[in-house]
Amino acid sequence: MGEQAKSAFMPREELLEKAVSKRQITIGIPRDKRDNEKRVSLTPEAVKLLTDSGNEIFIESGAGLGASYTDNDYSDNGAAITDTPQKAYECDIVIKVAPFNEQEPALLKGNQVVISYLNVPLMTDGTLTSLMHSRVTALACERIRDNDGVYPVVESMSEIAGAVKITRRPFACAPLMISAAVMVL
């Protein structure tokens, strides 16, 4: 076999035109309508990071009010504010804090990623069935565990809840607040 024939079977480096398109992901943040829910899944600063990297964020109007974030805070950082929950629930990724209620799974279009506290043991059969039929990939925040076996999301929410109880305690009974603060330290 000649040299030319042998070289035909040898690997060759070649620059190929590579079509890499940056896929824009839509992320929806619905307003959690549970009683006394003040948390929101993204801060305006997180929205800015996500929109700066080419993603599109849809936030239902009033979603951040419980956490003292206005619609303007979000829109100034690149989010689109929507008056209805449908637009937020139709996004590629839906991030919410409170578990789904009976009506919310019907708003999902399917083939999406949902990130939320799912709290499946307390979910009604109807809500769970509806969520399963939505054909979504659901990530339960309360089930995320690190390599040390710690549930970081649950731990941070517990710390926040403890801090809120300590700060609210002075209005109920001042001596208990002091003992609670000592226990925390």
Image (tube, rainbow, N blue to C red):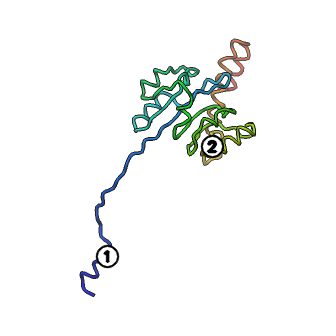
Q: Which mark is residue 134?
A: 2
Tell me which corner region of the image, top left, top right, bottom left or bottom right, holds residue 101.
Answer: top right
Q: Could you tell me which secondary element the residue under label 2 belongs to? A: loop
Residue located at (60% from left, 44% from top): 136
Compared to residue 80, the image places residue 12 above or below, namely below
Check residue 155 in the rendering and tell me which mark sits there, or answer none.
none
- Quarter of the figure with the C terminus: top right
**At 67% from the left edge and 20% from the top edge, which residue is drawn?**
166
Where residue 169 appears, as percent x and y from the top left, is: 70, 16
Look at mark 1 in the image and give the residue it sits on. 10
Q: Measure the alpha-carbon separation of dots 1 and 2.
A: 51 Å
> How packed is label 1: few (under 14 Cα within 10 Å), some, or many (20 or more)?
few
Left or right of 59: which side holds 167? right
Looking at the image, residue 3 lies above or below residue 175:
below
User: Which of 63/179 is in front?
Assistant: 63
Of labels 1 and 2, the one closer to you: 2
Position in image of residue 124 (x %, y %): 75, 37
Given residues 78 and 135, the one toward you in this image is: 135
The kind of residue on which mark 2 rests is Ser
Circle 1: residue type: Met
Q: What residue do we see at 58% from left, 43% from top?
A: 110
The residue under the point 73% across, 14% down is 175
Indicate the quadrant containing the N terminus: top left, top right, bottom left or bottom right: bottom left
Picture quarter containing residue 152? top right
